[in-house]
Image: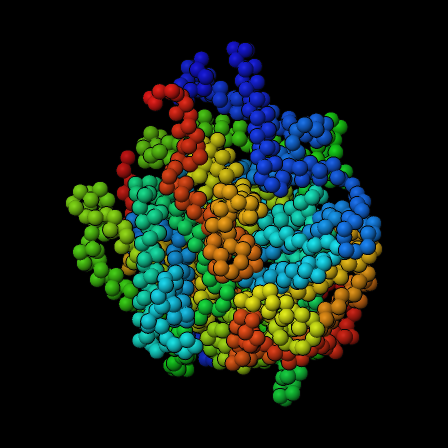
Amino acid sequence: MKFKRLLALFMALGLVASACGSSETDDGAAGESESSATTEATAEEETTTTAAPAEAEEPAAEIATDFGVTDDTIKVGLNADLSGPFASLVAEIVEGQTVYWEVVNANGGIAGRQVEMVVLDSGYATDKGIENYLTLAAESDEGVAMISENTGSPITAAIAEDAKDDDILVIPLSWASLWADPDIGPNILEKGTNYCIESMNGISFLADLVTENGDTPKLAILSRPGEYGADGFAGAALAAELLDIEVVYAAEGEVAGDDRTAVVTQLVNSGANIVWTTLTPGETADIFGNAVAQGFEAQWSGNQPSFNYLAHLGGDLAESFDQYWWQSGYTVPWNGNDSEGMQDLVAAFTELRPDNNLSDVYAIGWMEGLMVQTVLEQAAANGDMTRAGIVAASQEVTVDFKGLGPNQSWAGSYNDSVVRESYMFDADATAFDIQPVSSGTGSTGLFIEKGPFVSEIVADYVFDGPCI
Amino acid sequence: MSFGRPHLRTSYEQDSAIFPTYFQKGAAGLFLIFIVLMVLGNGAAGWIPTWLFGQTWLNPLTLVLPFAIAALGFNILTGVTGQVSLGHAFFMGVGAYSAVTLGGKGDGGVKACVPFADNIGLLDKAGECGLGLPIWIWLPLAGVFAALVGILVSPAAVKVRGLYLAIVTVGLVFIGLHIARMLPEYAGDYESGRKWPKLDIRIWKEEVPFIDMNEDGKWLGLIYLTEEQKQFFFLFAILLVMMAFAKNLVRTRTGRALQAIRDRDVAAEVMGVPEQHYKRVGFAISSFYAGIGGALWASYQGRVSPVDFSLLLSVEFVAILLIGGAGTIAGTMMGTLFVELLPKAVEKLTNWLSGNLDSGGVIGDLANIMLTSGPGDFGPVSTSPTAPGWPMSVFLWNPVIYGVLIVIFLIFEPHGLFGIWVKIRNYWKGWPFSY
Amino acid sequence: MIDVLLLAQESTGFFPTFLQTLIKGLALGSIYAVMGIGFVIVFKGTQVLNFAAGGIAMAGALFMSILVNDAGLPFLPFSNPLAPEIGTTPSIPRWLINLVLALIIAAILGMVLERIAIRPMIGQPLFSMAVITLGIETALGPFNRDATSLTARSLQIPWGLEQWEFLGAGIPKSYVGAMVAAVLCFLSINLFFRSRFGVAMRAVAFDQEAAQAQGINVGRVFSIAWGLGAALVAVGAIFYGMGPFPPQGTVSQEIHPVLAFRVLPVIILGGLDSIPGALYGGLLIASAEVFAGQYLAQWTSVLGAGYSTIVPYIVMLIVLLVRPYGLFGSEEIRRV
């Protein structure tokens, strides 16, 4: 009996040993070996200093590195929604960044290093997003130097504190006013203006329109639950207070669920002539369509994610949107101006992705690329491409977006670093015509009406922290 | 003494033992060895490959543990009692929100715990409610509250049966989501949720925890463990306790009553098993497990939003049970591992394939057939994650593969992974003879 | 803070609002009913609760949009000869012909899925079959999502958002269209059940083995049940895609959650195996939902945002407490 037990134990040990052995050899054969990667990683807990290789194009300067940067590559991570509700949008933004790096790498990369993207899919689920973050921020060779895109306010809020602890730079794909908050740290590098200021600019614009027609502005604000909705709503409410506009219907976080009859009813009965929405495109279409069908007339606009030209200008509501909708935004639409940045973007896509359909959001990915490049080059010039070094470098730079959007820097107080400019676009359903990039024709149907502009209430206002 | 022959019990003690066969004892021993090796892997012994215990697999593996606890509860309700529920996510949510209310840090004080505090004028602005109590209070209470809610809804649930029950519990999930949206003081922001208390053991509300699980270091001054390993062991210990309880439950009077209801409810009632009472008990126990699992999951994740407790989560448990094999604990564990780690494995596989795209040989050819790297190539999987349209990206294929695997499993092996195991066991039992 | 002033006066009178709400309730109810009948047919024929209905329905709506937009057929080398010219809105007869084509393709999809995934499961527990359909639903989702992500998939509704004026209320043509479609579906299904196939299906529903012994081809009955079920849910999806329903004339992700789970209370209320039950259940649930949305709107702060979405589930719970097998469902006979 005792002997049998011993035997069993030995057999078990043998099994374990053989299992380890064989897997190891398998792994070795499979090319990029995971085992060696993590083995090194645990040994490499502390920051090591590596000399740049002799064959590098850049002068061989001593650059300190820790994770995600080797002698010939820099890894940047993207925690993107590629299978969830914003997949179509985010895929095009990621595409914008991909093309950007293709161009940069063809021109010799950054500090003699090629930029490599690590793209993970969150499906817009917070739990998956956190998991992805842990993978990207791993303090091992699997980790990345910085996260060049993190989709969505919920996931950004979920990882903000960890990013501060790990001292890793994150560019959020979210325009909540929270991210410039010093409490959240310098790690979350927001680009463009935020929902709150966008609402203020947008409502000023709409109020001017209504006043020019000789009416008294009456505002209705529609928002969905969550940080995005709360931020847009806070800005709209603030604008109403500063402009002294009557708010006839305030649906704070009330647009929820699949049935929006209650909101439409109250909106139509409120007698508003300005509507500001902080919604998803589907919610916007439903409420807008039903309100218009009931004979409701007003000047509509909303935070950028409320509107999607594909769904709204390509559907049955196109004419109504043309008539009543002004779109707000942070970046120049496709071929929307003849700035240097837009010319670069269009040229790169025409060359590298001729079959892709044109899209307004490539510019967002492109701008992320510009930001990352500026920050990383600063870090390389500082001789410190560790994660902490990259974070420090981000506070020293001013990113030139070359006319794609207002230039930006992140040093100083909240009030100094927030971007105050936004754009207003005219929606033109007849011009809407999505064509492949290579055709050189076609339009998303959005044209700059005004901008980049700062409304008076925003210019004078002192922002001492996030709106929510 | 048989060497692990199934269903052959030579003594009554053996029949009621926790591990009735040598094989099961061996498997448990093997697992213990694995754990010891994992601890030794912390640099002390360099010959143990660290990839086995590194972050890459340990994090996903740790994440499996809370699901395994909740799945045990689902097994008690569906596998043992035969009541199909799609409301398991709801009870996980109840547990998680009990945990965060009791253990979380709130900015609004006790006043914030009054529902609609800002509406009735107690507070200017809705704050988050959290009492900051230690884990030994919030963890059991999370289970207890979930069980109480289970008892509360059971009058409706015990009346209906079969698919009707499944759909009624679907309603529960949606109502739960609505309540979470209405009560941000407990649930936090509807999309980004709120922070959960960390997995630290405190005696009371002191600053430095009694047992710290969020720093690398020596545990109780004895063994050196990384943060990830500490959390793994802690959750694993809880899982073991819950497993032992589940295993024992089946052998008690209650367990036998539950099984009788599953097998023939009318017959059970005729024989004097009060059907409604035991269904209620089954509901309560299952909800208790769900509550504990939900609380641990949320607190391991650090932040969970109400939308995470959606119907999809419930469906995951159904998949776990059917893939693992209903009614057994080993099956439940296998199912949980399979369902939770499958997406990760699929991802790794496509990564590996695209790494071998140009390597030639069989694998290279396979990769060429499967993957599309540019126009003119006709594989169904696009290596570019970003191009919408056909071919679809890897990320969109993942759920397809997941769904198809569920279908394939149920068609070819209705008894799940446990059934496959039984087949293998039966084959070797008589080897080299087929019978 | 800001003064929030809710204007009390109604822009329209009581009666037009009521009429509008009623019509909306009936139209939504028609869609729920058609979807519900699709569920019930599959359940009656094959004893499967079809959780994949959402995915199949959305695929059906996608087929429709491909037919009327692209002049091509999905995955087939030849083009659709009946497609309207690109860039034009089809005439009503041409649109209807394309609708029939789309339904045929949806039915084929349903039959294929049945043959692959359901047929091998005959004789397995109800629950395993239901989970198979959940697997199908998971697997279909990404295809639908991918197809809708490229462009807005318009349904090219001939009547767009036009509406009739009636007693001061605006009545969208789409609403009337949905009601007509529901009536037609209901009548043709009733006729079908009187035909030979229908009788065969009822026999199979009653006892599969006995039916087979009587020479009924059970496999074919399964196939037809799934084909019909898929076509019916596709009708529901296509008519739900029309404005002023939320998708506003396009096939979008907005359709999906509604079709997948909101219909469940309908069939539970009516009873899983009752076709008139699905009709009454659909009308009742949709009316409850729409009227609650319209007339309880000022109580939103108490009831919570989006309260009308859960009204169907609450109605369902209340009904089940009183009648555990729905209003029209046949009570299961429990044998020992």
Q: Farthest left residue?
A: C214
Q: How are the colours assigned in the image?
A: rainbow
Q: Is residue C54 above or below residue B137?
A: below
Count the numbered circles shown: 0
Q: Residue at x 44, y 13 (%)?
A: B1
Q: Is residue A301 above or below residue A33?
A: below
Residue B189 is situated, as x and y percent measured from the top left of the image, at 62, 56
Q: Nearer the viewer, residue B313 or C305?
A: B313
Q: Residue at x 63, y 84 (%)?
A: A210
Residue C171 is situated, as x and y percent measured from the top left of the image, at 39, 77
Q: Residue at x 64, y 52 (%)?
A: A118
Q: Nearer the viewer, residue C89 or B256?
A: C89
Q: Residue at x 41, y 70 (%)?
A: C70
Residue C303 is situated, as x and y percent measured from the top left of the image, at 53, 61
Q: Is residue C119 visible?
A: yes
**A417 lies left or right of A130:** right
Q: Quadrant of residue A85?
A: bottom right
Q: Quadrant of residue A406?
A: bottom right
Q: Farthest bottom residue?
A: A214
Q: Is residue B413 above or below residue B19?
A: below
**A140 lies left or right of A398:** left
* Quadrant for the C terminus of chain A in the image: bottom right
Q: Is residue B288 visible?
A: no
Q: Is residue C171 above or below residue A142?
A: below
Residue C153 is situated, as x and y percent measured from the top left of the image, at 45, 68
